[in-house]
Image: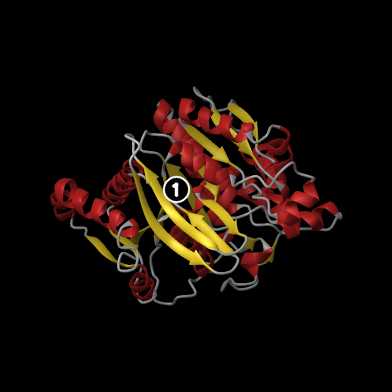
């Protein structure tokens, strides 16, 4: 059987721990037997990031700007314990944060729905898509450990050298300070991506922040969304029969818990980070969530929304059997392959990606799944498969013509 040709390489960003093991099995069993895979490879494993002074992360983002489509494995963001474990030169920042900052995009995350995995919130009947701003805020912050008494100020020096100062706090004891920022162009790109995505998927769009407390920072987000909607999207939304709705973040949470789903929830960076994990878990599993970073310049980075599955990796190193869910990582690959095929005009690559997604879902629908899903499924007598056997079962389904 001849393999499907690719015109343009994907940017391939390898990762860490158990997801790195899964990454290779997926390539070996589900992609390379059927696709003449072309990638520009970057090893974003923590050890190699440390060896390169994190230059490899920057290089991978620049490659994504150049080639347009990337697929990324889960990676470690080190804490103090990881610095010691991996003997790192320093506590490197999140590679996801660095890539998102360079691409300046919006992260769209939606649950992968399968038979037998019912949402914890019983009124949810349709998927809820999280649109997470991918730039700035706490992910591009500056922090300071206050050693003792003193005055902390926010200082802005304009291009002419004029200073403006705001008192943050008069400290009479040790404490901490955090500085965050965002820029209008990124917020505008975030808003436009959300409005366009809502129109393309024919879903209502919600946006939530805390402008009653953050009367300048959060209010700027609210104003940019509102102004853009009125000037560019109101008529288009009305013609499409969909709505744009703004509310406070706490009110949004309360409303969502009583909704039927089926809409896009736009969130600032940190809110989206937290709420996407909450939604994915409530819909069944962190490993059952698609995630794509869409830049305003037409670049796409697909990834799994979960971490590196450290506990399973340590079991794997001890030679013990694992049953690690690979669905989100498979869908990262299929998303990237489908987008590459769409941009390059290779419909056979798009078709392959969709067939692989169907084979993955059907494998679970037929009762064959990993342990995390077997514990919560409503299907009778599910078969629990180990990490490799689950991927092999998907290959069997793919070859059967799913």
Does residue 327 show up? yes
Q: Position of residue 284 (x, y in %)?
A: 54, 67
Q: Going 47% across and 37% down the picture, which residue do you hit? A: 102
As drawn, 205 above or below 250: above
Q: Going 68% across and 37% down the picture, which residue do you hit? A: 49
Residue at the spot of label 1 = 136
Q: Position of residue 138 (x, y in %)?
A: 49, 54
Q: Residues within 10 Å of mark 1 (few under 14, many from 20)?
A: many
The quadrant where residue 95 appears: top right
Does residue 36 show up? no
Q: Please state if 291 lies on the left or on the right of 212 as rendered.
A: right
Q: Please state if 247 lies on the left or on the right of 35 as rendered.
A: left
Colour convention: secondary structure
As drawn, 162 above or below 120: above
Q: Going 64% across and 61% down the picture, which residue do you hit? A: 369
As drawn, 378 above or below 2: below
| Front-lying residue, 147 or 308 | 147
Disc 1 is placed on an element classified as: loop
| Front-lying residue, 398 or 185 | 185
Q: Position of residue 113 (x, y in %)?
A: 48, 61
Q: Please state if 158 lies on the left or on the right of 49 as rendered.
A: left
Q: Going 45% across and 30% down the picture, which residue do you hit? A: 68
| Front-lying residue, 100 or 388 | 100
What number of labels is visible? Answer: 1
Residue at the right extreme, as displayed: 318
């Amino acid at each position: 059987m001849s393999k499907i040709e690719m015109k343009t390489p994907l940017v391939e960003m390898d990762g860490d721990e158990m997801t790195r093991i899964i990454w290779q099995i997926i390539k070996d069993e589900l992609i390379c037997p059927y696709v003449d895979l072309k990638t520009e490879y970057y090893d974003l494993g923590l050890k190699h990031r440390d060896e390169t002074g994190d230059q490899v992360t920057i290089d991978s983002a620049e490659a994504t700007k150049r080639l347009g489509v990337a697929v990324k494995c889960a990676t470690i963001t080190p804490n103090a314990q990881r610095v010691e474990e991996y003997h790192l030169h320093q506590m490197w920042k999140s590679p996801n944060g660095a890539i998102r900052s360079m691409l300046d995009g919006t992260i769209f995350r939606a649950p992968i729905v399968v038979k037998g995995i019912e949402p914890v919130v019983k009124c949810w009947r349709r998927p809820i898509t999280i649109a997470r701003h991918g730039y700035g805020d706490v992910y591009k912050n500056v922090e300071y450990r206050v050693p003792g008494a003193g005055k902390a100020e926010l200082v802005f020096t304009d291009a002419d050298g004029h200073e403006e100062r705001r008192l943050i706090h008069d400290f009479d004891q040790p404490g901490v300070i955090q500085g965050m920022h965002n820029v209008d162009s990124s917020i505008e790109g975030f808003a436009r991506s959300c409005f366009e995505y809502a129109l393309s998927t024919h879903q209502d769009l919600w946006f939530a922040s805390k402008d009653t407390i953050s009367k300048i920072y959060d209010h700027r987000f609210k104003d940019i969304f509102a102004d853009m909607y009125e000037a560019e999207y109101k008529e288009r939304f009305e013609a499409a029969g969909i709505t744009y709705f703004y509310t406070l973040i706490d009110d949004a949470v309360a409303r969502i818990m009583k909704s039927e789903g089926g809409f896009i929830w736009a969130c600032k960076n940190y809110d989206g980070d937290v709420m996407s994990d909450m939604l994915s878990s409530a819909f069944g599993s962190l490993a059952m969530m698609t995630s794509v970073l869409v830049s305003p310049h037409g670049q796409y980075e697909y990834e799994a929304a979960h971490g590196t599955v450290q506990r399973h990796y340590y079991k794997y190193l001890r030679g013990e059997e694992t049953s690690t869910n690979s669905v989100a990582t498979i869908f990262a690959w299929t998303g990237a392959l489908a987008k590459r095929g769409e941009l390059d005009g290779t419909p056979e690559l798009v078709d392959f990606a969709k067939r692989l997604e169907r084979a993955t879902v059907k494998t679970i629908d037929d009762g064959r799944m990993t342990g995390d899903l077997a514990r919560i499924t409503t299907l009778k007598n599910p078969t629990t498969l180990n990490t490799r056997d689950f991927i092999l079962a998907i290959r069997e389904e793919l070859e059967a013509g799913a």
